[in-house]
Amino acid sequence: MSEFSSQEKSGLYKAIYTRRDVRSHFNSKPIPNDVLARILNAAHHAPSVGFSQPWNFVLIRNHSTKQKVKESFEQEKTRSSNQIDEPKKEKYLSLKLEGILESDVNVCITYDPTRFGPFVIGRSSIPETGIYSVCCAVQNLWLAARSEEIGVGWVSILSNDALKQVLGLPDHIVPVAYLCLGHVEEFAQKPDLETANWLPRLDLKDVIYFEKWGQTQSPSWDQIHELIQTNLDYAFIK
Amino acid sequence: MSEFSSQEKSGLYKAIYTRRDVRSHFNSKPIPNDVLARILNAAHHAPSVGFSQPWNFVLIRNHSTKQKVKESFEQEKTRSSNQIDEPKKEKYLSLKLEGILESDVNVCITYDPTRFGPFVIGRSSIPETGIYSVCCAVQNLWLAARSEEIGVGWVSILSNDALKQVLGLPDHIVPVAYLCLGHVEEFAQKPDLETANWLPRLDLKDVIYFEKWGQTQSPSWDQIHELIQTNLDYAFIK
């Protein structure tokens, strides 16, 4: 159990590097129950502050619920487009940014700050760590889904107030992620926004500092500095 | 590239199910540079709202920096213990909750709300999604580290103000996670807080609702309801 074989290791990296935020390529094939159960169980085994496991998963297939969420998306998309100037605005409005109706299952993942509370180990100094735990569950779900050939798209152009109303969430429950899950025709090679030349992928070296903020060189870190000069190729993993 | 072999798939699930929040089992063996580079590159390939990649990684090996962070931990641990009554307080104080000095490398992962801003696609309606992206990077790092046999412990009993001062973070930069990385003697079979009987693992069925909040049964979800009656065993994955 302990050491990872090279195939097991490359399975993990493959999920990480080929995971995509899917909006365009969903098809109508239903997700088998056992696959969905495995994906949800992976999410449930995320780390959580003080082992509080503060998440819930609301599974949605009901068309009228999806339709209401989609309406909130449309409203928010229009509203946010007013913050952008042309020609970026036109480009923004032309992008496909969700697959709410096309995907088989929508999942709303929520945060419950009262779970096992009020005292949760490790949450007193930085209360936000409760929500951070839920985000780790989102990422587990996303990677497990990728390995099962299920696409996931996170829709964040939404009103949380609308979500709370549509799903009947109690006041104290925070919706963290609204995810669309489904089979896909293909997984894109690159993130859609990179392909659309909206933003470039940053180099790894540009996001790493040594010992303190802003320090991009350090004698004791010279070797790793060389290694991260460019993004590591996926092939480098093998 | 597209389909996952059963070995690749079980590699991903193995990382998810055997990942631990490590505090007790670090040893002093240094992390090889190529391993650390792969782990960081995995983190950098997390999803991010609007492809904003709003993270930085501050790598720390300097003993005096670690020592200052450890002091903040000690202060916050004492402070938070005053929120608990005996006998839980004594148990809390006896728990090993960090491995700051014993682990080879500490990594502070931060959030930069100005990255590619002010307008970031998908961040207008729910601004917190910027920080959520950074949490997804944390989870990628954690899983990649597990597959490389590197333990990771997230220390959240800390003052973010102290962290900002020690690491020289600019005002607008938010420290999200302070992680301890290092080789370990072993990965524990279960989460420390589960073994210590601090809190139980919830059943998967207890965190899942169908179609709307609070609905634990639904005719159209009967089959999956059966599948999630108990936690899925890791063996079930294979």
Image (cartoon, coloured by chain):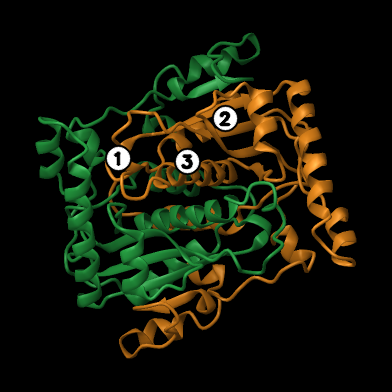
Chain colours: A orange, B green
Q: Secondary structure at mark 2?
A: helix
Name which quarter of the figure residue A51 lies in.
Answer: top left
Residue labelled with disc 3: A134
For marks 1 and 3, give the CA distance.
13 Å
**Which amino acid is tagged 3?**
Val
User: Mark 1 and mark 2, same subunit?
Assistant: yes
Give the side of residue A88 with respect to residue B185, left or right.
right
Name which quarter of the figure residue B61 lies in.
Answer: bottom left
Residue labelled with disc 2: A36
User: Can see residue B235?
Assistant: yes
Nearer mark to the viewer, of 1 and 2: 1
Please identify the quadrant where the C terminus of chain B is shown: top left
For marks 1 and 2, give the CA distance.
27 Å
Q: Secondary structure at mark 3?
A: helix
Q: Residue at x 18, y 41 (%)?
A: B82
Residue labelled with disc 1: A50
Give the side of residue A179 with respect to residue A209, left or right.
right
**Which amino acid is tagged 2?**
Leu
Spot occupied by residue B157 in the image (x, y as percentages of width and height): 27, 52
